[in-house]
Image: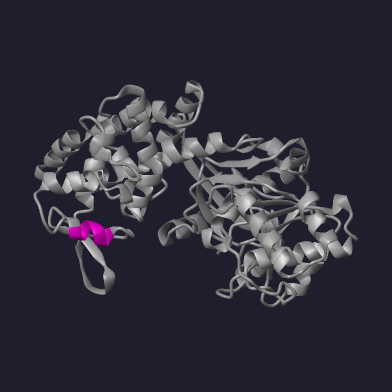
């Protein structure tokens, strides 16, 4: 049987959380742009949890903005879907299953724009959430009176203008708007684009005042690995065990974080924050950004090439090796943690680092190192270079683990150009694909010179790193030595 509201009464699985009938009567308080698994596995997860405890008491209307695909699966399942959460918490395996009832409707922007504008006119609406990918938050000069506008900011402005007109610009009709796109200051950037678009559309000054003063655009940061639907074998196993078919079910790790920049007024509106410590509303989310960027992303980046060149395909495989685990632990606690360029309490940083190690050990998430290596040089520049420079500023000595990670990165980027702009490297006779905007540079620099010369040229390239890394005392020699061991190993 298919998962649906009608079939809920026929499902009786121990440990499976099923929504009560009263949830389906809750008002629609959230307008969400995006149907993706991250939104369904994080913001919608928190909202669903709060609804179960009688706190937020509001459901989500989802806007499907793209023309690809349909909303048929949502319609067939009454917008219900299962979240299978699995992970490691304090060294122990944890597993939960929840049928989420957060979503009330999924509307197509192309075919149901008037219905979306009707939601904008609803007195119950309080919150807008989005995840339209990083390219979604950009200015497109367009007429927002089109049905619908093409861009996400255009659609959002049209919704806000419709609301302004419906409530005659009342100050209490404004919304809390929370983009979750993975760009720094996503709320501020979205607000700036919407304001500029409003000016381009020559909307009245009174609306501009309402837009700026009655609405809250919040920066936010999301952190949860949500791979999506279970693979075929796992899906068939879950269907046989649970007794129902779910074409919307998603896998997610246990860990979850949604950090939102806001004050007490924002907290009152986002009351779902009361039900899960994973929702953090604070005046400054930079702490959480630095923890994630350095201890999670920075560690991934510095370990990526070393792990792949050592023969590990996934993060979980690498974490099963004693020597690799020793390396990653030393890297995080002794070199990255003290070098974070932001004042963070040691206890807070250590707690986050331990959670990261638990996440890396998660046996249920297949996170491939080659996927992590995409745009590798950019990730090194953004995530690692500030740590390296700060480590030298604090200790003026070579960070051994960072040097090893850098040497492995340079070996990984020993690439050659192929057909159709593709670049590949080779290790132990096996070819791998490199996706990096600087791949052409690395292919060229490897054409001439011995290993030591190539490494020195890479390290001193200010265009790559915004710094001459060869000027750091002992760093070049350490990277060359580690490279030699990796290359001959």
Q: Which residues are magenta?
A: 439-444
Q: Is residue 98 left or right of residue 121?
A: left
Q: Residue at x 47, y 27 (%)?
A: 349
Residue that appears at 19% across and 54% down: 414
Residue 215 visible to the viewer? yes
- At x 24%, y 64%, the residue is 423
Count of labels shown?
0
Q: How is the image coloured?
A: one colour
> Would you say 101 lies left or right of 436 here?
right
Find out whether residue 181 is within the magenta segment.
Answer: no
Q: Position of residue 351 (x, y in %)?
A: 48, 27
Q: Quadrant of residue 363?
A: top left
The quarter of the picture where the N terminus appears is bottom right
Q: Going 16% across and 56% down the picture, which residue do you hit?
A: 446
Camera-side residue of 377 and 333: 377
- Residue 184, percent from left and from top: 54, 48
In the rendered image, the quadrant that contains the C terminus is top left
Of 100 and 478, which appears nearest the observer?
A: 478
Confirm whether residue 12 shows in the render: no
Image coordinates of residue 254 in percent, x first then y, are: 52, 41
**Which quarter of the figure has residue 444?**
bottom left
Image height check: is 231 above or below 456? below
Is residue 53 or residue 385 the one in the foreground?
Answer: 385
Residue 379 location (% of width, % of height): 38, 48
- Main secondary structure along the magenta-highlighted residues: helix
């Amino acid at each position: 049987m298919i998962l649906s509201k009608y079939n809920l009464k026929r499902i009786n699985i121990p440990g499976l959380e099923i929504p009560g009938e009263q949830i389906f009567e809750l008002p629609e308080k959230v307008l969400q742009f995006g149907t993706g698994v991250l939104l369904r596995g994080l913001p919608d997860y928190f909202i669903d949890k709060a609804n179960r405890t009688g706190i937020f008491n509001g459901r989500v209307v989802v806007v499907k903005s793209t023309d690809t695909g349909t909303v048929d699966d949502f319609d067939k399942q009454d917008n219900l879907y299962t979240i299978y959460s699995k992970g490691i918490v304090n060294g122990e395996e944890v597993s939960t299953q929840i049928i989420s009832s957060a979503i009330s409707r999924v509307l197509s922007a192309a075919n149901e724009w008037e219905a979306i504008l009707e939601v904008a006119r609803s007195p119950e609406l309080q919150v807008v959430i989005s995840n339209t990918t990083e390219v979604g938050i950009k200015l497109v000069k367009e007429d927002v009176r089109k049905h619908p506008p093409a861009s996400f900011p255009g659609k959002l402005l049209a919704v806000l203008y419709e609301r302004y007109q419906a409530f005659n610009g009342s100050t209490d009709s404004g919304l809390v708007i929370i983009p979750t796109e993975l760009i720094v200051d996503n709320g501020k950037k979205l607000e700036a684009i919407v304001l500029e678009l409003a000016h381009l559309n020559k909307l009245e000054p009174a609306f501009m005042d309402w837009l700026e003063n009655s609405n809250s655009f919040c920066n936010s940061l999301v952190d949860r690995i949500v791979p999506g639907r279970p693979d075929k074998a796992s899906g068939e196993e879950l269907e046989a065990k649970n007794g129902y078919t779910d074409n919307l079910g998603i896998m997610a790790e246990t860990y979850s974080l949604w950090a939102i920049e806001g004050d007490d007024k924002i907290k009152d509106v986002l009351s779902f924050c009361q039900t899960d410590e994973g929702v953090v509303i604070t005046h400054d989310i930079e702490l959480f950004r630095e923890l994630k960027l350095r201890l999670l992303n920075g560690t991934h980046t510095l370990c990526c090439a070393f792990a792949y060149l050592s023969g590990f395909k996934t993060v979980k495989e690498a974490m099963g090796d004693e020597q690799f685990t020793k390396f990653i632990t030393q890297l995080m606690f002794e070199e990255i943690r003290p070098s974070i360029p932001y004042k963070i309490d040691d206890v807070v940083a250590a707690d986050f680092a331990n959670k990261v190690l638990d996440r890396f050990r998660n046996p249920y998430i297949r996170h491939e190192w080659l996927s992590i290596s995409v745009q590798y040089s950019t990730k090194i520049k953004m995530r690692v270079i500030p740590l390296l420079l700060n480590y030298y500023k604090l200790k003026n000595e070579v960070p051994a683990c960072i040097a090893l990670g850098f040497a492995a990165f340079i070996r990984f980027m020993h690439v050659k150009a192929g057909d159709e702009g593709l670049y590949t490297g080779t290790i132990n006779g096996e070819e791998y694909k490199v996706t990096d905007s600087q791949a052409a540079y690395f292919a060229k620099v490897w054409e001439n010179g011995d290993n030591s010369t190539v490494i020195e040229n890479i390290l001193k390239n200010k265009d790559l790193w915004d710094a001459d890394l060869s000027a750091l005392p002992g760093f070049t020699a350490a990277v060359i030595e580690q490279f030699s061991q990796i290359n001959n190993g």
